[in-house]
Image (cartoon, coloured by chain):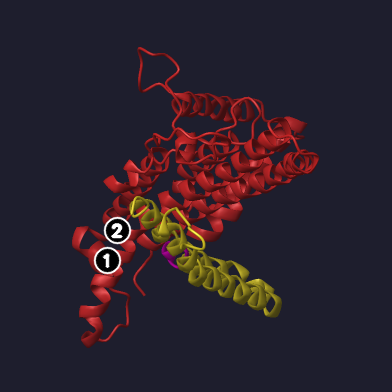
Amino acid sequence: MIPMELVGSLGIVGYGLGAIGPGIGVGLIFASVIQGTARQPEARGAMMGTAWIGFAVTEALAIIGIALAFVFGGL
Amino acid sequence: MSGFLSGLVPLETETEGFQAPGVQSFDVPPLFESVPWFDKYMLQGMLSVILILAFWLIMARKSALVPSKGQYLGETAYFFVRNTIARDMIGHDFLKYLPLLIALFSFVLINNLFGVFPLSLLPTPSHVGWPYGLAILVWVIYNAVGMAKHGFFGYLKHTTLPSGVPAFMWPLIIPLEFVSNIIVRPITLSLRLFANMFAGHLLVLVFVLGGEYLLLHSESIINKTAGVVALIFSMAIFGLEIFVQSLQAFIFTVLTAQYISSAAAEEH
Protein backbone atom coordinates (compact mmCIF):
# COMPACT_ATOMS: atom_id res chain seq x y z
CA MET A 1 0.00 0.00 0.00
CA ILE A 2 1.29 3.43 -0.92
CA PRO A 3 0.20 5.96 1.73
CA MET A 4 0.86 9.04 -0.40
CA GLU A 5 2.16 9.49 -3.90
CA LEU A 6 3.90 12.63 -5.06
CA VAL A 7 4.43 13.19 -8.77
CA GLY A 8 6.50 15.91 -10.36
CA SER A 9 10.07 16.83 -11.01
CA LEU A 10 12.81 16.30 -8.43
CA GLY A 11 14.70 19.14 -10.14
CA ILE A 12 12.37 21.65 -8.47
CA VAL A 13 13.26 20.28 -5.02
CA GLY A 14 16.93 20.47 -5.98
CA TYR A 15 16.54 24.08 -7.01
CA GLY A 16 14.85 24.88 -3.71
CA LEU A 17 17.78 23.36 -1.83
CA GLY A 18 20.27 25.10 -4.13
CA ALA A 19 18.70 28.52 -3.52
CA ILE A 20 19.36 28.38 0.24
CA GLY A 21 23.09 29.10 0.01
CA PRO A 22 22.90 32.06 -2.40
CA GLY A 23 20.02 33.47 -0.35
CA ILE A 24 22.14 33.53 2.79
CA GLY A 25 25.13 34.83 0.82
CA VAL A 26 23.31 37.75 -0.80
CA GLY A 27 21.83 38.63 2.58
CA LEU A 28 25.29 38.69 4.18
CA ILE A 29 26.69 40.90 1.39
CA PHE A 30 24.06 43.59 1.68
CA ALA A 31 23.99 43.39 5.48
CA SER A 32 27.69 44.25 5.40
CA VAL A 33 27.08 47.11 2.96
CA ILE A 34 24.40 48.57 5.23
CA GLN A 35 26.68 48.30 8.25
CA GLY A 36 29.58 49.83 6.36
CA THR A 37 27.42 52.70 5.11
CA ALA A 38 26.17 53.37 8.62
CA ARG A 39 29.73 53.52 9.95
CA GLN A 40 31.24 55.52 7.09
CA PRO A 41 28.64 57.04 4.73
CA GLU A 42 31.17 58.61 2.34
CA ALA A 43 32.63 55.19 1.43
CA ARG A 44 29.29 54.01 0.05
CA GLY A 45 30.22 54.29 -3.64
CA ALA A 46 33.36 52.17 -3.30
CA MET A 47 31.51 49.57 -1.23
CA MET A 48 28.61 49.31 -3.67
CA GLY A 49 31.00 48.55 -6.55
CA THR A 50 32.46 45.56 -4.74
CA ALA A 51 29.05 44.56 -3.46
CA TRP A 52 27.52 44.33 -6.95
CA ILE A 53 30.39 42.10 -8.14
CA GLY A 54 30.03 39.88 -5.07
CA PHE A 55 26.26 39.81 -5.51
CA ALA A 56 26.64 38.72 -9.15
CA VAL A 57 29.07 35.92 -8.28
CA THR A 58 26.96 34.69 -5.36
CA GLU A 59 23.70 34.78 -7.25
CA ALA A 60 25.33 32.87 -10.12
CA LEU A 61 24.85 29.69 -8.06
CA ALA A 62 21.10 30.20 -7.80
CA ILE A 63 20.91 31.02 -11.51
CA ILE A 64 22.85 27.89 -12.50
CA GLY A 65 20.44 26.04 -10.20
CA ILE A 66 17.33 27.25 -12.04
CA ALA A 67 18.93 26.39 -15.38
CA LEU A 68 19.73 22.86 -14.16
CA ALA A 69 16.20 22.49 -12.78
CA PHE A 70 14.96 22.93 -16.36
CA VAL A 71 17.68 20.66 -17.81
CA PHE A 72 16.83 17.81 -15.42
CA GLY A 73 13.13 18.69 -15.33
CA GLY A 74 12.19 15.66 -17.40
CA LEU A 75 13.86 13.16 -15.05
CA MET B 1 21.75 24.44 -23.36
CA SER B 2 19.67 22.42 -25.80
CA GLY B 3 18.04 20.63 -22.90
CA PHE B 4 17.24 23.97 -21.36
CA LEU B 5 15.57 25.20 -24.54
CA SER B 6 13.68 21.97 -24.97
CA GLY B 7 12.04 22.69 -21.63
CA LEU B 8 10.30 25.63 -23.27
CA VAL B 9 8.21 23.63 -25.76
CA PRO B 10 4.54 23.18 -24.78
CA LEU B 11 3.59 20.05 -22.89
CA GLU B 12 1.08 17.75 -24.55
CA THR B 13 -1.23 17.10 -21.63
CA GLU B 14 -4.99 16.83 -21.75
CA THR B 15 -6.36 16.79 -18.21
CA GLU B 16 -9.74 17.70 -16.81
CA GLY B 17 -10.23 20.73 -14.56
CA PHE B 18 -7.75 23.43 -13.74
CA GLN B 19 -4.76 23.75 -16.06
CA ALA B 20 -1.93 25.10 -13.95
CA PRO B 21 0.18 27.70 -15.79
CA GLY B 22 3.64 26.49 -16.67
CA VAL B 23 6.33 26.85 -19.30
CA GLN B 24 3.68 26.24 -21.97
CA SER B 25 2.05 29.58 -21.03
CA PHE B 26 5.02 31.40 -22.56
CA ASP B 27 4.71 29.75 -25.97
CA VAL B 28 2.65 32.42 -27.75
CA PRO B 29 1.48 31.73 -31.32
CA PRO B 30 2.72 33.94 -34.18
CA LEU B 31 0.53 36.95 -34.98
CA PHE B 32 0.20 36.00 -38.65
CA GLU B 33 0.23 32.40 -39.82
CA SER B 34 2.47 33.18 -42.80
CA VAL B 35 5.25 34.88 -40.74
CA PRO B 36 6.30 32.37 -38.06
CA TRP B 37 9.03 34.54 -36.46
CA PHE B 38 6.78 37.56 -35.87
CA ASP B 39 5.17 36.82 -32.49
CA LYS B 40 4.15 38.99 -29.56
CA TYR B 41 7.70 39.16 -28.19
CA MET B 42 9.00 40.49 -31.50
CA LEU B 43 6.18 43.05 -31.74
CA GLN B 44 6.95 44.31 -28.22
CA GLY B 45 10.66 44.48 -28.91
CA MET B 46 10.11 46.58 -32.04
CA LEU B 47 7.54 48.76 -30.28
CA SER B 48 9.93 49.40 -27.39
CA VAL B 49 12.65 50.61 -29.76
CA ILE B 50 10.22 53.10 -31.33
CA LEU B 51 8.99 54.26 -27.90
CA ILE B 52 12.51 54.75 -26.50
CA LEU B 53 13.70 56.55 -29.62
CA ALA B 54 10.69 58.87 -29.54
CA PHE B 55 11.14 59.53 -25.79
CA TRP B 56 14.79 60.51 -25.97
CA LEU B 57 14.39 62.50 -29.21
CA ILE B 58 11.52 64.53 -27.77
CA MET B 59 13.45 65.04 -24.52
CA ALA B 60 16.58 66.20 -26.35
CA ARG B 61 14.82 68.47 -28.86
CA LYS B 62 13.60 71.44 -26.84
CA SER B 63 15.86 72.02 -23.87
CA ALA B 64 15.27 75.25 -22.03
CA LEU B 65 17.18 76.81 -19.13
CA VAL B 66 14.05 76.61 -16.99
CA PRO B 67 12.82 73.07 -17.67
CA SER B 68 9.20 72.19 -18.31
CA LYS B 69 7.64 69.16 -16.62
CA GLY B 70 8.46 66.88 -19.55
CA GLN B 71 12.06 68.04 -19.76
CA TYR B 72 12.42 67.60 -16.01
CA LEU B 73 11.31 63.96 -16.35
CA GLY B 74 13.80 63.33 -19.12
CA GLU B 75 16.63 65.00 -17.21
CA THR B 76 15.87 63.00 -14.08
CA ALA B 77 16.00 59.75 -16.04
CA TYR B 78 19.22 60.83 -17.77
CA PHE B 79 20.96 61.94 -14.59
CA PHE B 80 19.92 58.75 -12.80
CA VAL B 81 21.79 56.62 -15.34
CA ARG B 82 24.63 59.14 -15.68
CA ASN B 83 25.37 59.74 -12.00
CA THR B 84 24.14 56.68 -10.12
CA ILE B 85 25.20 54.03 -12.62
CA ALA B 86 27.87 55.32 -15.01
CA ARG B 87 29.86 57.76 -12.85
CA ASP B 88 29.80 55.68 -9.66
CA MET B 89 30.73 52.44 -11.40
CA ILE B 90 33.12 53.42 -14.20
CA GLY B 91 34.83 56.50 -12.77
CA HIS B 92 36.40 59.47 -14.51
CA ASP B 93 36.23 58.08 -18.07
CA PHE B 94 32.52 57.25 -18.06
CA LEU B 95 31.13 59.57 -20.76
CA LYS B 96 32.30 57.26 -23.59
CA TYR B 97 30.06 54.43 -22.36
CA LEU B 98 27.05 56.54 -21.36
CA PRO B 99 25.06 56.08 -24.64
CA LEU B 100 25.36 52.30 -24.36
CA LEU B 101 24.26 52.29 -20.72
CA ILE B 102 21.30 54.60 -21.36
CA ALA B 103 20.16 52.51 -24.33
CA LEU B 104 20.51 49.26 -22.34
CA PHE B 105 18.69 50.67 -19.31
CA SER B 106 15.75 52.04 -21.31
CA PHE B 107 15.46 48.90 -23.45
CA VAL B 108 15.47 46.50 -20.51
CA LEU B 109 13.18 48.72 -18.41
CA ILE B 110 10.54 49.25 -21.11
CA ASN B 111 10.53 45.59 -22.11
CA ASN B 112 10.24 44.50 -18.48
CA LEU B 113 7.38 46.92 -17.87
CA PHE B 114 5.47 45.39 -20.78
CA GLY B 115 4.80 42.63 -18.24
CA VAL B 116 2.48 44.87 -16.20
CA PHE B 117 1.21 47.20 -18.97
CA PRO B 118 -2.49 46.24 -19.34
CA LEU B 119 -2.51 45.94 -23.15
CA SER B 120 0.52 43.63 -23.42
CA LEU B 121 0.88 41.72 -20.10
CA LEU B 122 3.92 39.76 -21.21
CA PRO B 123 7.48 40.76 -20.30
CA THR B 124 9.65 40.42 -23.40
CA PRO B 125 12.72 39.03 -21.52
CA SER B 126 10.60 36.11 -20.27
CA HIS B 127 11.56 34.54 -23.62
CA VAL B 128 15.16 33.47 -23.09
CA GLY B 129 16.36 34.60 -26.53
CA TRP B 130 16.11 38.30 -25.68
CA PRO B 131 18.41 38.23 -22.62
CA TYR B 132 20.83 36.02 -24.57
CA GLY B 133 21.05 38.67 -27.29
CA LEU B 134 21.63 41.48 -24.79
CA ALA B 135 24.25 39.48 -22.88
CA ILE B 136 26.15 38.60 -26.08
CA LEU B 137 26.21 42.31 -26.95
CA VAL B 138 27.55 43.21 -23.49
CA TRP B 139 30.10 40.36 -23.61
CA VAL B 140 31.49 41.51 -26.97
CA ILE B 141 31.66 45.13 -25.81
CA TYR B 142 33.44 44.63 -22.48
CA ASN B 143 35.96 42.23 -23.99
CA ALA B 144 36.58 44.63 -26.89
CA VAL B 145 37.06 47.52 -24.46
CA GLY B 146 39.61 45.50 -22.50
CA MET B 147 41.47 44.37 -25.62
CA ALA B 148 41.58 47.91 -27.01
CA LYS B 149 43.05 49.11 -23.72
CA HIS B 150 45.56 46.37 -22.88
CA GLY B 151 46.07 44.46 -26.16
CA PHE B 152 44.92 40.83 -26.65
CA PHE B 153 47.42 39.03 -24.40
CA GLY B 154 47.63 41.97 -22.04
CA TYR B 155 43.86 41.77 -21.55
CA LEU B 156 43.95 38.01 -20.98
CA LYS B 157 46.64 38.49 -18.32
CA HIS B 158 44.76 41.44 -16.83
CA THR B 159 41.47 39.60 -16.57
CA THR B 160 42.70 36.19 -15.43
CA LEU B 161 45.49 37.20 -13.03
CA PRO B 162 44.77 39.65 -10.21
CA SER B 163 47.88 41.56 -9.19
CA GLY B 164 49.76 40.38 -6.13
CA VAL B 165 48.99 36.67 -6.43
CA PRO B 166 52.05 34.51 -5.56
CA ALA B 167 53.36 32.26 -8.33
CA PHE B 168 52.44 28.93 -6.72
CA MET B 169 48.75 29.97 -6.75
CA TRP B 170 48.70 30.67 -10.49
CA PRO B 171 47.55 27.20 -11.65
CA LEU B 172 44.55 27.54 -9.35
CA ILE B 173 43.70 31.21 -9.89
CA ILE B 174 44.07 31.50 -13.67
CA PRO B 175 41.46 28.86 -14.72
CA LEU B 176 39.13 30.03 -11.95
CA GLU B 177 39.27 33.67 -13.01
CA PHE B 178 38.98 32.74 -16.69
CA VAL B 179 35.80 30.72 -16.09
CA SER B 180 34.40 33.39 -13.78
CA ASN B 181 35.16 36.45 -15.94
CA ILE B 182 34.83 35.15 -19.50
CA ILE B 183 32.36 32.26 -19.41
CA VAL B 184 30.06 32.63 -16.39
CA ARG B 185 29.51 36.41 -16.65
CA PRO B 186 27.39 36.48 -19.85
CA ILE B 187 25.46 33.37 -18.81
CA THR B 188 24.47 34.76 -15.42
CA LEU B 189 23.79 38.23 -16.85
CA SER B 190 21.22 36.80 -19.28
CA LEU B 191 19.74 34.12 -17.04
CA ARG B 192 19.30 36.53 -14.10
CA LEU B 193 17.09 38.77 -16.21
CA PHE B 194 15.27 35.83 -17.81
CA ALA B 195 14.64 33.94 -14.56
CA ASN B 196 13.30 36.99 -12.75
CA MET B 197 10.91 37.92 -15.54
CA PHE B 198 9.85 34.31 -16.12
CA ALA B 199 9.22 33.55 -12.45
CA GLY B 200 7.47 36.86 -11.83
CA HIS B 201 5.12 36.42 -14.76
CA LEU B 202 4.42 32.82 -13.70
CA LEU B 203 3.52 34.09 -10.21
CA VAL B 204 1.03 36.57 -11.70
CA LEU B 205 -0.45 33.81 -13.89
CA VAL B 206 -0.88 31.46 -10.92
CA PHE B 207 -2.78 34.07 -8.90
CA VAL B 208 -4.93 35.43 -11.72
CA LEU B 209 -5.79 32.15 -13.46
CA GLY B 210 -6.20 30.28 -10.17
CA GLY B 211 -8.40 33.01 -8.76
CA GLU B 212 -10.50 33.10 -11.92
CA TYR B 213 -10.96 29.33 -11.84
CA LEU B 214 -11.90 29.30 -8.16
CA LEU B 215 -14.37 32.17 -8.63
CA LEU B 216 -16.14 31.08 -11.82
CA HIS B 217 -15.78 27.32 -12.11
CA SER B 218 -16.40 26.05 -8.57
CA GLU B 219 -19.60 25.59 -6.59
CA SER B 220 -18.69 26.05 -2.93
CA ILE B 221 -18.85 29.50 -1.38
CA ILE B 222 -15.50 29.03 0.38
CA ASN B 223 -13.76 28.47 -2.94
CA LYS B 224 -15.41 31.54 -4.46
CA THR B 225 -14.22 33.65 -1.50
CA ALA B 226 -10.69 32.28 -1.91
CA GLY B 227 -10.87 33.19 -5.60
CA VAL B 228 -11.83 36.79 -4.81
CA VAL B 229 -9.00 37.03 -2.26
CA ALA B 230 -6.52 35.63 -4.79
CA LEU B 231 -7.63 38.13 -7.45
CA ILE B 232 -7.28 41.05 -5.01
CA PHE B 233 -3.89 39.77 -3.87
CA SER B 234 -2.74 39.56 -7.49
CA MET B 235 -2.78 43.38 -7.50
CA ALA B 236 -0.13 43.30 -4.75
CA ILE B 237 1.85 40.83 -6.89
CA PHE B 238 1.66 43.32 -9.76
CA GLY B 239 3.12 45.97 -7.44
CA LEU B 240 5.94 43.61 -6.49
CA GLU B 241 6.50 42.93 -10.19
CA ILE B 242 6.90 46.64 -11.00
CA PHE B 243 9.57 46.82 -8.26
CA VAL B 244 11.38 43.68 -9.44
CA GLN B 245 11.29 44.78 -13.10
CA SER B 246 12.79 48.19 -12.34
CA LEU B 247 15.39 46.59 -10.06
CA GLN B 248 16.41 44.07 -12.73
CA ALA B 249 16.83 46.83 -15.33
CA PHE B 250 19.01 48.70 -12.81
CA ILE B 251 21.09 45.61 -11.94
CA PHE B 252 21.59 44.70 -15.61
CA THR B 253 22.95 48.18 -16.35
CA VAL B 254 25.05 48.34 -13.17
CA LEU B 255 26.69 44.99 -13.92
CA THR B 256 27.39 46.04 -17.51
CA ALA B 257 29.08 49.19 -16.23
CA GLN B 258 30.98 47.13 -13.67
CA TYR B 259 32.23 44.65 -16.28
CA ILE B 260 33.36 47.47 -18.59
CA SER B 261 35.05 49.20 -15.67
CA SER B 262 36.92 46.08 -14.55
CA ALA B 263 38.00 45.32 -18.14
CA ALA B 264 39.31 48.85 -18.66
CA ALA B 265 40.89 49.29 -15.22
CA GLU B 266 44.50 50.42 -14.94
CA GLU B 267 47.19 48.10 -13.59
CA HIS B 268 48.06 48.89 -9.99
Label annotation for residue A39: none
Vertical position of residue B135 compared to residue B263: above or below: above
| Residue depicted at 42% across the width and 65% down the height | A61
Letter of the chain in yellow? A
Vertical position of residue B88 compared to residue B214: above or below: below
In the drawing, does residue A35 fall left or right of residue B34? right
Q: Quadrant of the C terminus of chain B?
A: bottom left
Residue hosting label 2: B183
Q: Residue B44 appears at what percent x and percent y?
A: 51, 27
Give the SS element for disc 2. Answer: helix
| Residue depicted at 37% across the width and 36% down the height | B9
**Which residue is at the front of the view, B93 or B119?**
B119
At label 2, which amino acid type do we have? Ile
Q: Residue B133 appears at what percent x and percent y?
A: 37, 40
Kindly indicate whether the residue at mark 1 contacts the one at mark 2 (C-beta within 8 angstroms).
Answer: yes
In the drawing, does residue B243 fall left or right of residue B3? right
